[in-house]
Image (cartoon, rainbow, N blue to C red):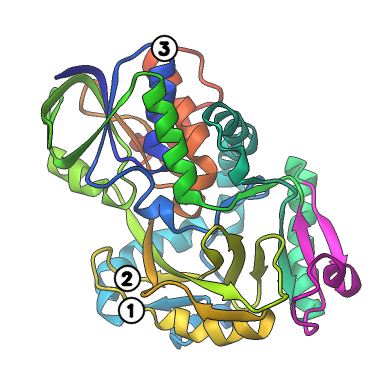
Amino acid sequence: MTFDALVLGAGIVGVSVAVHLQRRGMSVALVDRKSPGNETSFGNAGLIQREGVYPYAFPRDIGTLLRYAGNRSTDVRYHVSAMATIVPFLARYWYHSAPKRHAEIARHYSTLIAHCVTEHRELIAASGAGDLLREGGWVKVFRTAAAMNAAQRDAERWREEYGVPFERLDAARLREDEPALTRALVGGLRYTASDSVSDPGALVAAYARYFESLGGQVFNGDATTLQPQWSVQTQAGRIDARRAVVALGPWADTVTAALGYRLPLAVKRGYHMHYRAQEGARLNQPVLDAEHGFLITPMTRGIRLTTGVELGLRDTPPTPVQLAAVEPLARETFPLGERVDAEPWLGRRPCTPDMMPIIGPAPRHRDLWFAFGHAHHGLTLGPITGRLVAEMMTGETPVVDPEPFGALRF
């Protein structure tokens, strides 16, 4: 079977790339070892973060670093056995997180973030997935006035620099919006321009069905069998294509390394669990506990509790101690009932040291394209990445300048 383009990876980024290429008249094969939306894209918090103009930086203050070094923080944990491997990555991450460098990164990163909500809403409408969309933003809540005031200063800077709106909620207003939350909270900040979804995996699946309705085809296959120029093995047999796109998220290096690329990709692992709400309790929107580093959000399956960051190797077996640490805190924050899932879900966020995704042509291979490394904002940036890659591949004028995201920066 021969196609115009082969897209490896059926998460939110790969599916979005496939949709935009198919829309532009290409015949596209989308290949993954699982059905669309069943790896990293399945388990996130479901946020489409219009406020995320500054990507998540490595902390630089001594107090926070010492707290993390103790490896008992609720928001960040690490595997001691992985440190020898990932410390060089973390050192580069720390370097790029210096305030001036971070601000310069945000200047580029914000050009993608600016399109995240509009691009998602367009695909949601086209795919008939409107029942999954929740407009009106999400809330970051606080237990101390000092933490809330510090976060507000950041939000005011984002508003001044990039026009990102927010709303301050005092304790009374927060209780009005979310009466089931603990009264220990002093208030919150609502990021009103952002959206969220009630089932990220179902959203990706809806986009994939839309891709198929346009004439695209989805195959179960092994991305590591990719061969120039360009073929891959699937359960339906060998697929050939003129062009190939690597959109494999945290597994991108299984293909790029075999082709001779040494791109600095690491993972931030994270967990989730679903719960029933106790009788009479209702959660209306995603809520992030800023000081404990967990998020609770209403999902189709129940209340999803997501953890912060676990630093480790991609393929190490699950170690959900972080989930065990935050679950009692989450129960104090909102009346969670029994667990719904048999086991915690583990996901892996693909990260680069400069906090920006790798988007664009492969430097040493004709008709090979990269689209991975979106870290915490994979769901947020999937559709705009798909559009940008498709525009570049078809010679259109790109909606944003792609140069800052190219692989040549490494």
State the residue in front, 99 or 223.
Answer: 223
Q: Amino acid at mark 2?
A: Gly
Q: Badge 3: few (under 14), some or many (20 or more) residues near its Cα, within 10 Å?
A: few
Residue 352 location, x and y as percent? 39, 52
Asked where in the image residue 278 lies, by quadrant, the reply is bottom right
Query: Of callouts 1 and 2, which one flags the residue occurring earlier in the amino acid sequence?
Result: 2
Label 1 and label 2: CA atoms lie apart by: 10 Å
Q: Quadrant of the N terminus?
A: top left
Residue 286 location, x and y as percent? 65, 61
Q: Name the mark on residue 395.
A: 3
In the image, taking residue 30 as reference, residue 102 lies left or right, namely: right
Q: Is residue 190 magenta?
A: yes
Tell which residue pokes out farthest to the front in this image.
279
Q: Secondary structure at mark 3?
A: loop
In the image, taking residue 195 as reference, residue 26 lies left or right, namely: left
Q: Name the mark on residue 312.
A: 2
Q: Is residue 46 above or below residue 13?
A: below
